[in-house]
Amino acid sequence: MIKKIMASLIIGSLFLFMGCNRISNTVNDNKELKESVESIYFNNKIAISIAEEYMEALKSNDLEKIKRLSDKEVDKNIIISPSKELEITGIKQVGSAQLGNKTMFKFYVTRTKEGEPKADLEQYYLEVRKTEEGEYKVSELKSTELYSVFLDKDKLKIRKDDDVEINTLIDLKSIPDKIYPKVNVIDVAKVDVPKEAFSAVEISFSGDKVAISTYKGEDSYIGVVDVEDAQETAAKEGEDEGGKEDEKNDDKTLGKKITSLDVLNGCKISSLNFSDDDGYVVVNYVKGNGTRFKVYQSSGSIVSLELDDIFAEEEYNLIYERIQDNNIIMNVTPIIKSNNTESGLIGRYKISLKDFKLEKL
């Protein structure tokens, strides 16, 4: 009798194991079913949404939203970057890892001061945790500085991480004296580069490029500087010096190449923005009473958006907001409300960086 009971239990256990194994294999083989099962415990899509919303709140300095999205221990856990005088101009998520009831996100963040030659590239680690109450909250935020660009006399300086060593990125003398402007005219002549002083700058998310601008009077120049690794530069300079240590200059120049984008007459550059892949530069400028922008490839070519044909320069502001999912998001507002302003053109638009089509949101 006992043997029969034991045999029944063994057989029953085998069937139960085989059934559970089939369910497990079915769940693993079906991606949607697997995500559905996992979301019962921790929904990573919600965590992503919370992280992105939190970073946008940081960008807009929305303290109320920051407080709402943070957990009860936020004051103890969160360390905000000291770059308070610099505004966040760009955010890029570069990685994430889920572990149990939390996900850790990694972001690159660019900061600049409008119209001034000062910019930072920072790295943010943000943790979103599911609380006992089932809410998703930001439980930790840490930031570190990766690169900093700033003005020192007539030179732009660059510092990596927390290095004591500060190197020259580029000086005014290294900027070309004349370039071809990006205008729709055949056989156009070179124009003088306005380079009395530096103005707005921006560091790319990779840290490999820095967009710079200079001005003289009311005219502005824009270019992109490729950044060389400090160690590679030191090695090259060591070879060139040929062992003459006494003549060696500790201040290395890390700008290895400059690509001229354009000269804009009657324009003051307010800010510069890179796309996520460093492939494009958005140039924001003030002309007269209006605010507008142009888009260039980092390689030097202008992107012909033909926005002036739709939104007259004297009637509308074209305000760049951000780059999201390979789209430039912009807001169109009237400079001065008049009979010439078409209300149907007012509003937010997106411009695809793939085919450059314009679509109203």
Image (spheres, helix red, strand yellow):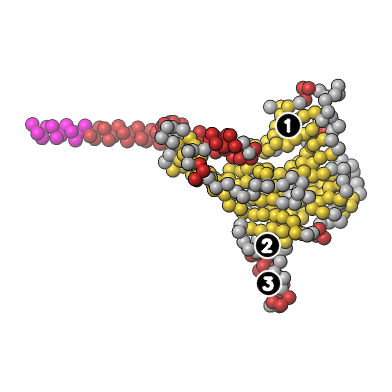
> Counting residues from the N terminus, which is met first, the one under dot 1 or under dot 3?
3
Mark carried by residue 166:
2
* Depth order, front residue of 251/40: 251
* Depth order, front residue of 175/33: 175
Spot the residue most to the front. Answer: 75
> Counting residues from the N terminus, which is met first, the one under dot 2 or under dot 3?
2
* Alpha carbon separation for disc pair 2 and 3: 18 Å
Of the 4 image quadrants, the one containing the N terminus is top left
* Depth order, front residue of 276/188: 276
* Alpha carbon separation for disc pair 1 and 3: 51 Å
Could you say whether the residue bearing mark 3 is in a helix, strand or loop?
helix
Residue extent of the magenta highlight: 1-12
- For the point 30% across and 32% down, which residue is it? 19
Q: Which residue is mark 1?
A: 331
Classify mark 1: residues with Cα within 10 Å, few (<14), some (14-19) or many (20+).
Answer: some
Q: Which residue is mark 3?
A: 238
Classify mark 3: residues with Cα within 10 Å, few (<14), some (14-19) or many (20+).
Answer: some
